[in-house]
Image (tube, helix red, strand yellow):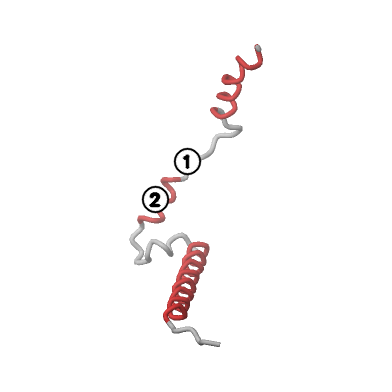
């Protein structure tokens, strides 16, 4: 019974402490993304952002094309056997 009474305290300690302190890197990222260098926001992050943007656009275009194909396929009359 005593173990069950201490369980909330143990659980709270497990989630409230971190093994190491993380450095706040938000101000560094804000400087990079707010810099006026003529680049769009989706490219300012570097090569990784460019690749993710192109991958996302590729998937979007492929999904749109596939949707239009199936919509056209559904609109056509079926052949009678």
Q: Quadrant of the N terminus?
A: top right
Q: Can you give x and y, in whole percent of width and height, for residue 51 in the image?
A: 51, 67
Residue lying at 51% horizontally and 68% vertically, measured from the top left: 55
Indicate the quadrant where residue 16 lies.
top right
Q: Can you give x and y, in whole percent of width and height, for residue 77 in the image?
A: 44, 84
Residue lying at 57% horizontally and 24% vertically, measured from the top left: 13
Establish if 42 lies above or below 7.
below
Residue lying at 59% horizontally and 25% vertically, measured from the top left: 11
The mark that comes first in sequence, 2 or 1, is 1
Q: Which mark is residue 48?
A: none
Comparing 23 with 76, the one in front is 76
Q: Can you give x and y, in whole percent of width and height, for residue 22 in the image?
A: 53, 38
Establish if 15 lies above or below 35.
above
Instruction: Give the SS element for disc 1.
Output: loop
Q: Quadrant of the C terminus?
A: bottom right
Residue lying at 44% horizontally and 73% vertically, measured from the top left: 64
Comparing 64 with 59, the one in front is 64
Relative side of 66 to 5, left or right: left
Comparing 49 with 71, the one in front is 71
Q: Which mark is residue 30?
A: 2
> How many dots with numbers?
2
Indicate the quadrant where residue 68 lies.
bottom left
Instruction: Give the SS element for disc 2.
Output: helix
Between the residue at mark 2 and the residue at mark 1, the CA separation in whole angstroms equals: 11 Å
Identify the residue under disc 1: 24
For mark 1, does the 10 Å Cα neighbourhood hold few (<14), some (14 to 19), or many (20 or more) residues? few
Comparing 7 with 23, the one in front is 7
Establish if 63 lies above or below 11.
below
Q: Can you give x and y, in whole percent of width and height, for residue 46 in the image?
A: 48, 62
Instruction: Please identify the residue farthest to the top as the structure is shown.
Output: 2
For mark 2, does the 10 Å Cα neighbourhood hold few (<14), some (14 to 19), or many (20 or more) residues? few
State if disc 1 and disc 2 touch (CB < 8 Å). Answer: no
């Amino acid at each position: 019974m005593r173990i069950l009474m201490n369980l909330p305290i143990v659980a709270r300690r497990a989630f409230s402490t971190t093994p190491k302190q993380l450095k706040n890197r938000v101000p560094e990222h804000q400087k990079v993304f707010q810099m006026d260098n003529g680049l769009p926001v989706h490219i300012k992050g570097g090569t990784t952002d460019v690749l993710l943007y192109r991958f996302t656009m590729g998937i979007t275009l492929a999904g749109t094309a596939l949707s239009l194909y199936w919509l056209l396929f559904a609109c056509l009359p079926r052949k009678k056997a």
